[in-house]
Image (spheres, rainbow, N blue to C red):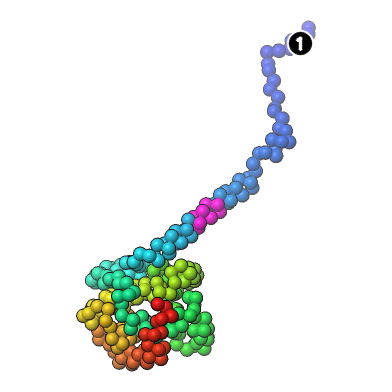
Amino acid sequence: MAKRVDTSKTYQSTPRTSKFDRINRPSASNKKGGSFRNVMRFLGKVLLYVWISTIVAIVLLKFIPVYFTPTMAARKIDALLAGEPSKIHSQWTPYKEIDRNCALAVIASEDQVFPDHMGFDFKSMWQAVNNNMKGKRIKGASTISQQVAKNVFLWQDRSYLRKGLEVYFTLMIELVWGKKRILEVYLNVAETGKMTFGMEEACRRFYNHSASEVSTTEAARIAACLPNPIRFSVANPSGYIMKRTQAIKRQMSGLGGKKYLYKID
């Protein structure tokens, strides 16, 4: 008897993949590569936006007063955490309303080649490196421009990241602001005492008058305290500050007095 064949069963053949399908199908390595490219693309956009924001900030601050800085914020936070008075004493004053003795004193004390460099005093920097290598007392070589860049845009520490950003901001404010604006900002944001910033507020707190009329001695004494205005006092100067005040006065005279500022004005 012949065996019956069940024709009701259907057979499905396994679909064959073409070489084109194998080529177009993403592999695991391609997926990883695509993810990496997406991450890098995202980071690139973030860096671009950050860079654009710095340009906008630099341009805006060329024209508007700098009322508050990261340094002021840090001092306020430290005071709050310590349970001490946290009021910031600062009053923006245009350059033309600040006695020229103040400008001359800070230049004589902090950066005597300020009108001539493009943000960096390489001679002083090299001397500082040599002193460091010889184990001598380290003396700062930051110019007024560098100090403004740090005080206005950055935080207070000695990391390589902060130093690198300081170079960028220093070059930018030199190019965009110019010397007169840099000096004006410095005279308003430099720390001149405990919770005190700027020449105007320093004169009011320590001398009981504005910064519009400041004697050579008064300006030199404020400048003498600038390296460490929390440790040194303008109101109660130590013997060291008094000696430094006299040295700054001699340097102010050696620069040619207020005529030296014609390079900036």
Q: Residue at x 32, y 75 (%)?
A: 96
Reply above or below: 63 against 191. Answer: above
Residue 45 falls inside the magenta stretch: yes
Q: Quadrant of residue 248?
A: bottom left
Q: Which residue is mark 1?
A: 3
Q: Nearer the viewer, residue 99 or 61?
A: 99
Q: In this view, which residue lies farthest toward the left?
A: 208
Q: Quadrant of residue 251?
A: bottom left
Reply above or below: 162 against 37. Answer: below
Give the side of residue 122 with respect to residue 229, left or right: right
Q: Residue at x 34, y 66 (%)?
A: 65
Amino acid found under the numbered disc labelled 1 = Lys
In the rendered image, residue 174, in percent from the top left (x then y), is placed at 47, 71
In the rendered image, residue 128, in percent from the top left (x then y), is placed at 49, 84
Mark 1: few/some/many CA within 10 Å (<14, 14-19, 20+): few
Quadrant in which the C terminus appears: bottom left
In the rendered image, residue 41, in percent from the top left (x then y), is placed at 55, 52
In the rendered image, residue 17, in percent from the top left (x then y), is placed at 71, 32
Give the side of residue 84 with respect to residue 68, left or right: left
Q: In this view, which residue lies farthest toward the top?
A: 1
Give the side of residue 258 with respect to residue 34, left or right: left
